[in-house]
Image (cartoon, helix red, strand yellow):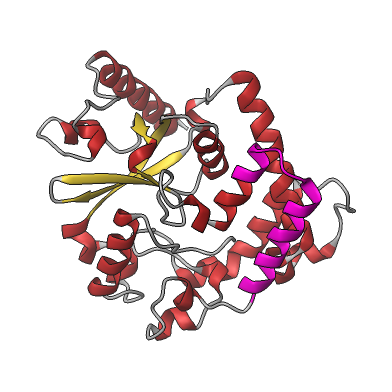
Amino acid sequence: MIYKILKKIILKSLDSIKSFLNLDRFNDDEKEGKIFKLTKFKFIPYTSIIVPFKLGRSIRGLSFQNNLKKDVLGAFVNDIVLDKDKEILIQNLFKELKKEKSFKASSIVDLKDNANLANYPAWALVMPWEKIDIKKKFQNYRKQFASRRLRYVTNIDKENKNFENEDIFYSFYHACSQFSQTKDLLENIKRDGLIFRRNDSPKICILIDDKEWRWCMSGDGNHRAYIASALGYKSFQCVIDTIIDKKNLSNCYNVKNGLYSTSEATTIFDNFFSGDKCLRGIV
């Protein structure tokens, strides 16, 4: 408990210092993806930052500015913002979910020769830099996902046991819950703006390739990022979850444990950096 309180105080202090020194935002050259000596002081993990959407990548690796139509969930959210027909949107998302049901983790990232990934379904995929073991995610993610989705489904019995098995990932109810969650968030953002509590802030990863940088969404705040982008926001306030430096990919958790080779991790990193290829499923 004391550790958590101290950590909260320290991070709040760091945020205040960064804001006072103008280190929580970027100059014009940095907004074009350039890194200077001072820039890395802005990349302090677990601190707040305001990032430009033009350098952003969705959690599926696609540029918010140029390629979000290739991101099925991103396009779905954008259509909700455009107030397109609810039933059509849900049915279309359900069709995409059914297509994905037979995919393997290896095919999602286009590494069909990776036998380790080929042993797992697409929904169990972890990135090279995520500190999550794919076996543990496979064992635990189903119930976590079902519990989270169930909050946004109002038209079924909440004791429905189907939510505790694999079908939830690719079910019609999943599609319905995505619509409900997005619609609720959209109305909140329209009413209150993009104001988040620190402990509920969206999380991002900073990607560094020599003297260039980009950012991508981490595990929290993905719907808010999609909505903000669709509404035309130029920047996004969030918290830095981790720093991923291309030259250090061999030290990433899922490279060191053998799930990915360094060359495979490099390929995935490069694809995220360029932002033109989808690297995750809808789930």
The image position of residue 252, as x and y in percent, is 28, 62
Does 84 appear in magenta? yes
Tally of marks = 0
Please give the name of the residue rendered at 42% of the width and 31% of the height, measured from the top-left corner.
Answer: 236
Q: Quadrant of residue 14?
A: top left
The image position of residue 183, as x and y in percent, is 70, 37
Does 201 appear in magenta? no
Q: Quadrant of residue 251?
A: bottom left
The image position of residue 207, as x and y in percent, is 27, 49
10 lies above or below 256: above
Please state which of residues 7 and 255 is positioned toward the viewer in this rendering. Answer: 255
Please give the name of the residue rendered at 25% of the width and 27% of the height, measured from the top-left corner.
Answer: 26
Question: Is residue 85 visible in this depiction of the protein?
Answer: yes
Q: Which residues are magenta?
A: 78-101
Please give the name of the residue rendered at 30% of the width and 56% of the height, measured from the top-left corner.
Answer: 274
Question: Is residue 43 visible in this depiction of the protein?
Answer: no
6 lies above or below 132: above
In the drawing, does residue 196 fall left or right of residue 133?
right
The image position of residue 47, as x and y in percent, is 34, 31
Please give the name of the residue rendered at 53% of the width and 66% of the height, measured from the top-left corner.
Answer: 137
Please state which of residues 156 and 176 is positioned toward the viewer in this rendering. Answer: 176
8 lies above or below 65: above
